[in-house]
Image (cartoon, rainbow, N blue to C red):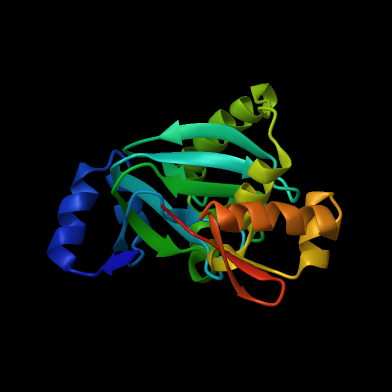
């Protein structure tokens, strides 16, 4: 992730967005954030909630349960909105977004600007349309059958900070398996080069 604060670059990108008039009316300080392919744009373990509008590139949005079961929610490109649910639910623990290619977004932090956002009718209409589309996707989505190995890897990528699973007992609880089963899966993944053991009961996902 790379943050860009150059005023002229931000102004040029803002002009490209279909939401430029709404953003200009809010008078909130913006920055640009660039993500590389495969990088998580939003995840449950992130400390700061950002509202982001895609300027360039594409992304995939997943609904990920605590047990690692992953549902493909939607894909998006230019003018897709991220952080709309966090406006009303500051702690969103189930939705993750991944850059499908190099991604550039206009962004600002939600918490210090929440009152301004909730008082702006045009902004609320904008995110209302976005949330309606996501709700429609949720009502029709279904999870593809996945093996325990797939769920373990998904759990590490989308639910563990920096892809690090700490503690077999806790991990097994969330994955609905026994610690012995989880250890066996992690051993297999380590032999396959998918994870690396970095401490007692601690494994890191190797991103490729």
Q: Residue furthest bottom?
A: 199
| Res 87 visible | no
> Which residue shows up at 21% across the image and 59% down it?
10
Q: Residue furthest top?
A: 140
Q: Quadrant of the N terminus?
A: bottom left
Q: Give the x, y percent position of residue 178.
A: 86, 54
- Above or below: residue 184 compared with residue 28: above
In the figure, is residue 30 to the left or right of 152? Answer: left
> Which residue shows up at 33% across the image and 67% down it?
29
In the figure, is residue 70 to the left or right of 78? Answer: right
Residue nearest the observer in this picture, 109 or 146? 146
Q: Give the x, y percent position of residue 181.
A: 81, 52
Residue nearest the observer in this picture, 124 or 201? 201
Q: Which picture quadrant has residue 58?
A: top left
In the figure, is residue 36 to the left or right of 191? Answer: left
- Above or below: residue 103 compared with residue 32: above
Q: Which picture quadrant has residue 69?
A: top right
- Above or below: residue 31 compared with residue 100: below
The mark total stands at 0
Residue nearest the observer in this picture, 194 or 136? 194
> Which residue shows up at 76% across the image and 61% down it?
171
Q: Give the x, y percent position of residue 173.
A: 84, 58
- Above or below: residue 51 compared with residue 161: above
Residue nearest the observer in this picture, 12 or 93? 93
| Res 58 visible | yes
In the figure, is residue 191 to the left or right of 76? Answer: right
């Amino acid at each position: 992730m790379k943050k860009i604060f150059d005023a002229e670059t931000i102004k040029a990108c803002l002009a490209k967005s279909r939401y430029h008039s709404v953003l200009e009316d809010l008078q909130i300080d913006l920055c640009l954030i660039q993500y590389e392919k495969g990088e998580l744009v939003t995840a449950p373990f992130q400390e700061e909630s950002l509202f982001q509008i895609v300027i360039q590139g594409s992304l995939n949005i997943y609904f990920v349960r605590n047990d690692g079961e992953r549902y493909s929610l939607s894909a998006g490109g230019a003018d897709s909105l991220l952080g709309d649910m966090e406006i009303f639910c500051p702690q969103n623990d189930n939705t993750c977004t991944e850059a499908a290619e190099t991604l550039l977004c206009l962004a600002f932090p939600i918490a210090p600007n929440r009152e301004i956002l909730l008082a702006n009718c045009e902004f609320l209409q904008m995110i209302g349309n976005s949330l309606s589309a996501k709700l429609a996707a949720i009502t029709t989505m279904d999870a593809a059958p996945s093996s325990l190995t797939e769920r373990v890897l998904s759990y590490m990528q989308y639910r563990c900070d920096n892809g690090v699973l700490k503690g077999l007992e806790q991990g097994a609880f969330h994955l609905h398996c026994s610690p012995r089963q989880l250890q066996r899966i992690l051993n297999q993944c380590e032999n396959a080069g998918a994870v690396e053991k970095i401490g007692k009961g601690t494994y890191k996902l190797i991103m490729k």
